Image (spheres, grey):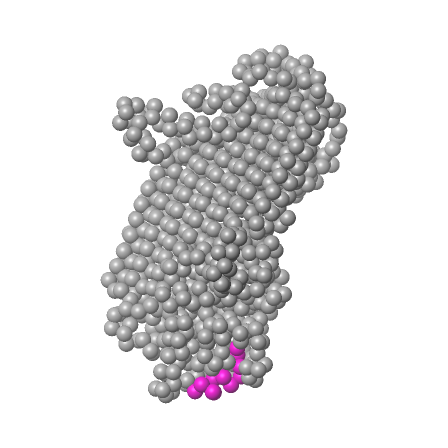
Amino acid sequence: MSENNAAAWQALTGRAGERAALLGTEGLPTRRVEAWHYTPLQSLNGVAWQAAPALDEAAVKQRVDALNLPAHDGLLVFANGRFCKSLSHLPACMDVQEYGDGAAVPALLAGRFSAGLNAALRQPGARLHVPAKTDAGLIVMISLTEGEGVSTHLHHSITLEEDARLSLLDIQLGEGQYLTNPQMDVHCADRAHFSHITHQAESREAARLGIISARIGERSNYDSFTLNQGGGVARQEVVSQLSGPFSNTNVNAIQLVDGNRLNDLSSMIHHASPDCTSRQTVRTVLSENGQGVFQGKILVDQIAQKTDGYQMNQALLLSEKAQMNSKPELEIYADDVKCSHGATVGALDEDQLFYLRSRGVLEEQARDMLVQAFLLETVELVEHESLRDYLLKALPGHV
Amino acid sequence: MPAVSETREAVEKLAKSNYEWGFETNVEMDLAPKGLNEDIVRLISARKKEPQWMLEWRLKAFRAWQEMSEPNWAKIKHPPIDYQDAHYFAQPKKKAGPKSLDEVDPELLKTYEKLGIPLHEQEMLAGVEGAGQKTPVAVDAVFDSVSVATTFRKTLAEAGVIFCPISEAIIEHPELVKKYLGTVVPVADNFFSALNSAVFTDGSFVYVPKGVRCPMELSTYFRINARNTGQFERTLIIAEDQATVSYLEGCTAPQRDENQLHAAVVELVAMEDAFIKYSTVQNWYPGDENGKGGIYNFVTKRGLCKGDRARISWTQVETGSAITWKYPSCILAGKGSVGEFYSVAVTNGHQQADTGTKMIHLAPDTRSTIVAKTISAGKSDSTYRGLVRMQPKARNGRNFTQCDSLLIGDQCGAHTVPYIESRNMSARIEHEATTSKISEDQLFYCRSRGFSEEEAVGLIVNGFCREVLKELPMEFAVEAQKLLQISLEGSVG
């Protein structure tokens, strides 16, 4: 461990106290660690990360009001890792349970650094419970972080009982050079339906290590979509386990990387039960010195016969300096399966550009149109109409 | 079985011509003491009568190796290898083998029969004692590389091609060996290549001069016997400007062997407009049905397209070995150079394969194609692991990758781990992978036409691999098809 690294490490383990063991003994992951090979955490080094102080609620309210939110049935606001009760409200059918002091890493996330970090420095986040046969509608959750050299580690837990439905728009934003490390553990009981949008719009200087675990019961559906567009170095990690038969999961994402930023979508789709389906489309647009990372694994257990898995990741490089690293992975132990993945990396299609130019479209406009078309196809995978509209507005040039 | 019959013919021909050259067997030196240290490296070098610079090269590699640790990223499992518990210089003749074919594992003989290997060759391959006497040709001699050079030396010499054992090349063509050895796979490239560099005892050297199209397919068929002595093969192939060469490396019969480590290194250098085609059919002993024994095949193969428009093509059919760890790669350094990788990897029983390729695009307009077919059966595990990297200067680079896996039975695993790295916007990379099983419809169709289930599976698997098999030289392709069928025996029903 270098001197610089030691500063960050000491601060984090010091704050973790007796939970420091959850962080392991290896220090911050380096490039030599396979899972972090493409996503170096140098920007975390040299900062003695402190706990984030409370923010002024009036200022937080102002930030929240400025957001162009879709019509919703509930709102949860967190500022610098603290729940802002006065700004939040929930539908009557839903409980916010008292948060226990659990600090274990769920089995699904064992060995993952982001989860260990969260467990060591965990702050209570949303703990939502949607009762059986209830449609909780659309809940918006906003996590705002502000400050320099501070870190937050919210832990959310979301449970959908049998036949329950929930849509969640999870917006993460902030200002300054901070570290944010949210974790969400999702549990969908049988026949539940959870549609989850993460809009990662953190500060351009921030480091973000977010992680989601999802356990999905029989005939249940966890539909995850991430818009990864902020953070200096930002990883969204999704571990989705199909643990009951006939369940489905989607782990889709759009990544928009510009400046000197790095955005990373790492996922593990685990078929642990027969007759399940999974779909994944990840599209990354890179400009300036942007670096994009996609690491997606589909794991099919021996019992998961009749699995149908599909994964596609495509990247569009718009500048000479942009870089894309992708690692789509299949690990398959069952023979009666249909699994495929595809990956493409390239520039805009010259023929398509020529077509538009020959019809009198200006070069710059033509490029924008093609980029937007590339993204639009992915946004259309979101079922919820108002969420789709929200995402379209968040994309550059308002598709 | 053209290649096998070719082997047989060659053996017979030599028998008739009263092959007299004695095989150099120094009884004293049959076995170097167990273990690996600088003295052993010196001993190997001295036995090979190598010049001082070669010894120093080996020692450098050995010292580097001592600092390194075994790679652990591959998806393979095996008990730790004790590198000190092996002979690094050994002659197989000393080993007490079975007295006659009756004592040989009948399973092994069955396989030979299917491959159409003549009886005396079977004895030789099974390591029957005295097999060499019954066939006075001294199969050793035929199988020793010296004879290759003898048989074809004239034709090759007329064309200006050098094809000889690398130990001979070190002495006779030191300028060429010095210039190229270790330039594609540096001594300290990885754990196994460093080990190989320190202790390699055998291998081939090929040099094709400018503008020459090698008049025949170069083959190591005749040297399979050397496998037993040289666990550490070293091959170096150089094709000068506009030269073309096709090299076949093969072992079509599984050998009676213990759990044994093979760490070979192959280096290819292709200059401007040169073309090197390197084909491998590997069918070493995969271990018994309980996963006991078998070869650990840890190989480093790499080609450098040094000149503009150079082309290197790797084709491999991997059906043997208990563990295969092998990534034939291309470094595309010349403008417009081309790299190709065609692979079939079949695993059955308890075999494990972690294989694939690396295509490193350094120059503009470079192209690469990867077609990898993986077939897993029994309790085996097979992984395709590949890297495609477009460096910033690889303007207009192109890559197409296709990985298909076929699973036979629910006890096996098939995995795909491609790494795709692009640092140039004008480069285009496409990758696709599928995993599936043999469809019931296809099976039913074949069965309804009178094929047994096993034959039907063989047929379908051959169809699945066609894209790769068609890249093999004719005689290899025929054998490879048979091999696939044999490897998958017992995997259905």
Residue A197 place in picture, x, y as percent:
57, 27
Residue B342 visible? The answer is yes
Give the residue drawn at x 52%, y 50%. B436
Residue A301 place in picture, x, y as percent:
62, 47
* Residue B213 located left or right of residue B437: left
Residue B403 place in picture, x, y as percent:
46, 50
Residue numbers of the magenta segment:
B126-136
Give the residue drawn at x 43%, y 83%. B138
B78 is higher (above) or lower (below) than A388: below
In this figure, what is the number of numbered marks?
A: 0
Residue A167 sits in which quadrant? top right
- Is residue B278 or residue B205 the one in the foreground? B278
Give the residue drawn at x 57%, y 53%. B413
Give the residue drawn at x 33%, y 41%. B395
* Residue A307 located left or right of residue B425: right
- Is residue A94 or residue A79 the one in the foreground? A94
Residue A207 sits in which quadrant? top right
A100 is higher (above) or lower (below) than B476: above
B347 is higher (above) or lower (below) than A30: below
Residue A4 visible? The answer is no
**Which image quarter is the C terminus of chain B in?**
bottom right
**Which image quarter is the N terminus of chain B in?**
bottom left
* Residue B226 located left or right of residue B33: left
Residue A256 lies within the magenta run: no
Residue B391 place in picture, x, y as percent:
39, 43
